[in-house]
Amino acid sequence: MYGIDRSPPRAIIRATVTEQVGPTQSATSSTASVAPTVIAPGNYDGVHLGHQALLRSATSFAQANGLLTSVLTFDPHPGTFLGAAEKPVITRQPRRAELLRAAGADRVHVQHFTHAFAALSPEEFIETLLERGARALVVGPDFRFGKTRAGDVNLLVQLADERGFSVLIEPPVLLDGERVSSSAVREALNAGNVLRATKLLGRVHEVQGKVVIGNRRGRSLGFPTANVAPEAVLPPADGVYAVVARDLAAPEGVLYRGVANLGTRPTFEAGRSMEVHLFDFEGDLYDRELRVGFVARIRGEQRFSGVEELRRQIEHDCDRARELLSGVAPEWTERM
């Protein structure tokens, strides 16, 4: 649909999984109390199309062999222990775990990433997965593991031979010739290209936060807004966006449409904020958690000569947002 290219996974089978552990069989003393599983380890920031493809392969292999599908993810990001510059996340826990389960994971394990865990050798890291019941691992071709990322897929295959588990290597997913990755999502969001981010994620990018009391300036202009104190995730570039929003206290599936402004509100020099005007909404959202999905960018932030010029522009922004939202694909918002 969008030029998505996904080659079939390259399976490297090093053990006959169904002969090792059945539903009622016991394993070695270190794994006897845990259910046999396929484990897909990784950071999964954003749970983008590449992550989803990897989980489809894991789920397919698990179902064919009578196993569970498990994800092992990490918090905080391992890069913070390896000297990499800290990057704002695309999706935080527990929302990341919700999306992983929706993508097929039976279980999601969040490993607290500590200096002690970072110091594990590649062999010790694999041992921790076997202790969790791993009978197969599903990874991407660039998968690295163990202290200083010393382990790669070649070592993983070698360890699979030695320890008797299976490995599936999932090739990258390409979208219009570009590799789908968390970095590509970040690049799109930093540019304000939320449509590109949506295609890479397979859903709209979300920012969630509590509605707090603002200066009520939007109400005085005829466009009451919910002032959202956003969680620490990567927002799109400053500007005005067509959005969908969900009050997390309301019944699931109830979505509102609207327009959002991200930025510093230069006309009033009022500081950074995220303001959301919901169409056809009447009610009180204060202290409620609002999840906002960014569908399309309307314009960048502007400074206006006065209140009346700003009001006319907001009217135009709302009209444009309604047009853009009328054509949004249902699958982009169904998981909100």
Image (tube, rainbow, N blue to C red):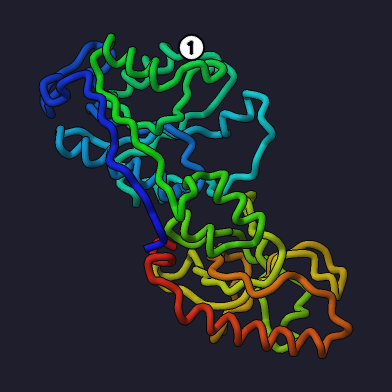
Query: Where does the C terminus fall, quadrant-wise?
Result: bottom left
Q: Position of residue 268 (x, y in %)?
A: 86, 74
Q: Image check: 261 left or right of 35?
A: right
Residue drawn at x 53%, y 49% as measured from the top left: 91
Q: Which residue is mark 1?
A: 121
Residue closer to the observer: 225 or 320:
320
Q: Position of residue 190 (x, y in %)?
A: 66, 54
Residue drawn at x 64%, y 62% as measured from the top left: 192
Residue at the front extreme of this rendering: 177
Residue closer to the observer: 46 or 193:
193
Query: Where does the N terminus fall, quadrant-wise?
Result: bottom left
Residue drawn at x 53%, y 45% as measured from the top left: 182
Q: Is any part of residue 281 visible from this angle?
A: no
Q: Secondary structure at mark 1?
A: loop
Q: Image check: 23 left or right of 293?
A: left
Residue closer to the observer: 241 or 227:
241
Q: Position of residue 241 (x, y in %)?
A: 62, 71
Q: Report which quarter residue 64 is drawn in.
A: top left
Q: Report which quarter residue 134 is drawn in.
A: top left
Q: Image check: 324 left or right of 143?
A: right
Q: Is any part of residue 309 visible from this angle?
A: yes
Q: How many marks?
A: 1
Residue type beneath disc 1 = Ser
Residue at the top extreme of this rendering: 162
Q: Report which quarter residue 264 is drawn in.
A: bottom right
Q: Alpha-carbon neighbours of circle 1 within 10 Å: few (<14), some, or many (≥20)?
A: some
Give above or below for 119 relative to 195.
above
